[in-house]
Image: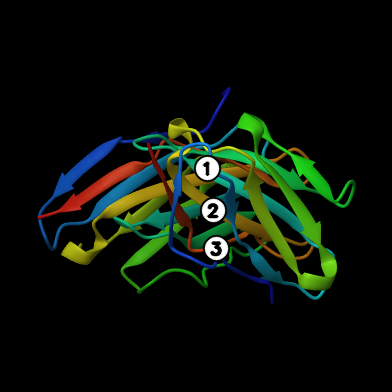
Amino acid sequence: GAGVSQSPSNKVTEKGKDVELRCDPISGHTALYWYRQSLGQGLEFLIYFQGNSAPDKSGLPSDRFSAERTGGSVSTLTIQRTQQEDSAVYLCATPGGGTDTQYFGPGTRLTVL
Amino acid sequence: AQSVTQLGSHVSVSEGALVLLRCNYSSSVPPYLFWYVQYPNQGLQLLLKYTSAATLVKGINGFEAEFKKSETSFHLTKPSAHMSDAAEYFCAVKTSYDKVIFGPGTSLSVIP
């Protein structure tokens, strides 16, 4: 596609439920990042996919968080047993332009009640 | 490993005054450096980037940044602040061998 898309744009869930967030990257971009932006906070790196290499999971805050990327394209971030502190905007980005300029999606705003 | 620091989580300037947002990085190899901006209720977008060409980089909306290797800095400036510049600004660093790392961000307020 022309840009990075994410779905849903908003997600409200109850504490303890599992959620799946989806990212459709720019076609042909081999790398993909997930970030988390909490209210008034900066960008927290979560996970990084680069081609067929093993993903860099060093930013995932707990084992309740996982992500996969199927076929080098669409990525899904899964949060199990959601907690209120998981409430944030989850951003997906794919770098490009030869110098890894980040192209960000619009984000998914997750609210855990 | 590389890292980014931004001095000042919040900066306030008067309309028409100089804007200076600080960014310092650490990297063991020549970096690529970026400034991104996030306007209220909008997504992040690239403001400008340094890619080892000219050390003074000009971006959108009158912003520019200068790469100073000796100071490991990439400060963002604009000669005259406008109300529409109020936003969150993020500095980021990347090398050829590692992922992009973002700084914590600086919130810019412009006072009329």
Tell me the number on the disc at residue B90.
2
Front one among B30 and A66: B30
Examine the rendering and report whether any part of residue A2 can be seen: yes
CB under 8 Å between discs 2 and 1? yes
The amino acid on which the numbered mark 3 sits, given as a three-letter code, is: Gly
Q: Which residue is mark 3?
A: B103
What's the CA distance linking mark 2 and mark 1? 6 Å
How did the renderer colour the structure? rainbow
Q: How dense is the environment of label 3, judged by Cα within 10 Å: few (below 14), some, or many (20 and up)?
A: many
Up-down: is A108 above or below A66?
above
Q: Is residue A84 left or right of residue A43?
A: left
Instruction: Tell me the chain of label 2.
Output: B
Report the quarter where the N terminus of chain B lies: bottom right
Tell me the number on the disc at residue B37.
1
Please tell me which residue is depicted at 59% across the width and 53% down the height of the picture: B20
Report the quarter where the C terminus of chain B lies: top left
Up-down: is A57 above or below B65?
below
